Amino acid sequence: GQQLNQSPQSMFIQEGEDVSMNCTSSSIFNTWLWYKQDPGEGPVLLIALYKAGELTSNGRLTAQFGITRKDSFLNISASIPSDVGIYFCAGQLWAGGTSYGKLTFGQGTILTVHP
Amino acid sequence: EAQVTQNPRYLITVTGKKLTVTCSQNMNHEYMSWYRQDPGLGLRQIYYSMNVEVTDKGDVPEGYKVSRKEKRNFPLILESPSPNQTSLYFCASSSASGARVEQDTQYFGPGTRLTVL
């Protein structure tokens, strides 16, 4: 199946710093998604991207859908302690008007924010 | 409250003893999926279901079974668990209708931590 490579695997930063993580795929997706997982919980959707080159923001989070459709990045500005968690990229392929709920996830980036 | 529930949340069992992890959603979603999460590997899809009585294999289906007899329930069955199935399991659901973002938003359950000795 398709594979997503997400980097970095982990990050240790000081509160207030900006964060950047990215995801690359061996093949094309037509939807890129970024999820966050808090400790002891399931992932929650942060941002969804639908067009190559699209840049979308959600508060301090900004994500972009790569022009090649094989990559995406997520930036977090001015990090705060509650940003701690695991961030996952995910890709979906739509065909015939649906994705059938089939997601492919990256390996995740573990973010630690020191106050 | 819209939610996906899983039971049990924690389970320790022994090799070969059949078990079922239940999943239920109250959002009338058509799509449901099971994932396993392992360190360094992210979440990998085990099985997914497009609607009642319609299921298909995900990326890592070996050793698992599912059924979808009712829209709200999607149990995961391990007929003969083995230690390599020790993992954190998530059930998720999403809608098949509405705007694309609604269809792409998967709602995850709280997870089931399974240990097979």
Image (cartoon, grey):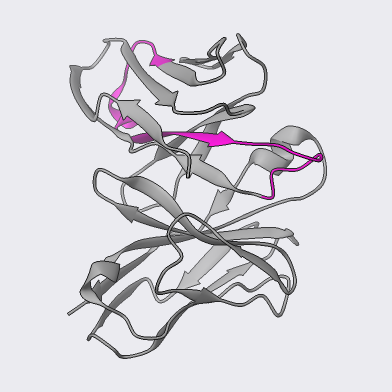
Front position in the image: A69 or A48: A69
Image coordinates for residue A48, horizontal then vertical, percent: 60, 27
Image coordinates for residue B105, horizontal then vertical, percent: 63, 41
Q: Quadrant of residue B70?
A: bottom right
Q: Residue sitting at 35 percent across and 54 percent down?
A: B37
Vertical placement of residue A7 versus B70, above or below = above
Image coordinates for residue A38, horizontal then vertical, percent: 36, 43
Image coordinates for residue B53, horizontal then vertical, percent: 73, 74
| Residue A8 lies in the magenta-colored region | no
Q: Residue furthest bottom?
A: B17
Q: Quadrant of residue A69?
A: top right
Q: Is residue B26 visible?
A: yes
Residue B39 falls left or right of residue A51 = left
Vertical placement of residue B91 versus B13, above or below = above
Q: Residue sitting at 21 percent across and 74 percent down?
A: B83
Vertical placement of residue B21 versus A90, above or below = below
**Residues drawn in magenta:** A75-100
| Residue A77 lies in the magenta-colored region | yes
Q: Quadrant of residue B110?
A: bottom left
Front position in the image: B12 or B52: B52
Q: Residue sitting at 82 percent across and 46 percent down?
A: B97
Q: Is residue A113 visible?
A: no
Quarter holding the N terminus of chain B is bottom right
Front position in the image: A27 or B50: A27
Q: Residue sitting at 35 percent across and 30 percent down?
A: A5
Residue A4 falls left or right of residue B116 = right
